[in-house]
Image: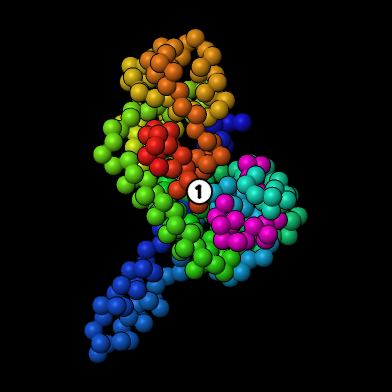
Amino acid sequence: MSHSRTVVGVIGCVALAAAITLAGCAPREEPSRAVTDTAALPPPVDDFRHEAPRGEARRIVSLNPATTELLVALGAADRLVGRTSWDLYTPAVRRARDLGNGIRPNVEAVLETRPDLVILYGSEDNVIAARRFRDAGVATLSLKLDRIGQLERAALLVGAAVGQEGRARVVVDSVHRTLDSVRAAVEGKPRLRAFWHVWDAPIITIGRGSFLHELVEIAGGENVYDDVSTPSPRVELEDIARRDPAVVLAGPVGARRIRSEQRWRAVRAVRNGRVLVVDTNLVARPSVRLGEAAVSLARLLHPGSL
């Protein structure tokens, strides 16, 4: 499994909110202005600049794990007829057909499920597939959900596509309230310098462009590679040792490898037994479980804070 597919993981529609604000501030003697301004707004588009679908899609293929979790939260998991190999959250999702990893999907296999909506990860690798689905008369929604700030727009667009916009707003509000509570719980505590082990050969970590970097900061940590702008840079063991993190964060498999391999003892945190195992089921994607993910990280970095 290539790194680009493993680390797959959409984006913020403020135009409507802005229009509502303007409507509230419009002079009383000109009520028609606000209506005209709102009506003139262009329809929202996805990350391939296609008009985002609206309605109540009944047969959905989600090839973006983050949006699959959104569908679960919106009560639409029973409409799912296709998913990626990584989507195993809830029995309803697992009953949907496994259609691969979501990148460059088998278009014919997807169409066999007779979908009325296909949700794709907004990668250039999926541009051709999106066009073929639309040519076949199937609505598509292509979203790149890689950062916490992109969750709201993604949730609202998915909510609009399945007729659950109100519920989508509730979901987003709940996530942000939890994130705020984590920030408050760790406020004033020492910020532990952390190295996050994502992959081993080559060694891959998180940079400032990753939502995992954001989660570390929310949970009261400091990413030792916060000076790197890319989401998932390759790094050398010698450089990790030089940056001298206080803790090493890793999934269960990575943690076992780090603890057992002699080479990792070049890192002082490893020698001191400061390898912390993260719950990869929670932190794997920037979706509706971001609040839970932040709580779990805060409990690792600052035990007793939550």
Q: How many marks?
A: 1
Would you name the residue on which mark 1 appears? 289
Q: Residue at x 56, y 57 (%)?
A: 73
Give x and y (percent) for residue 270: 43, 17
Check disc 1 and report its element: helix, strand or loop.
loop
x and y percentages locating residue 278 in the rendered image: 49, 33
Residue 217 visible at all: no
Q: Nearer the viewer, residue 15 or 108?
A: 15
Q: In the image, what residue occupies the spot 73% across and 51% down?
A: 95
The answer to whether residue 259 is left or right of residue 111 is left
Q: Quadrant of the C terminus?
A: top left
82 inside magenta stretch: yes
Q: In this view of the protein, which residue sits in the foreground, 91 or 102?
A: 91
Residue 53: say if magenta.
Answer: no
Q: Residue furthest right?
A: 112
Q: Is residue 247 above or below residue 59?
A: above
- Residue 91: give x, y in percent of width and height: 69, 50
In the image: residue 119, left or right of residue 27: right
Rate crowding at label 1 as few (under 14), some (14 to 19) or many (20 or more) other CA atoms within 10 Å.
many
User: Magenta region: which residues?
Assistant: 69-87
Residue ranking furthest to the top: 262
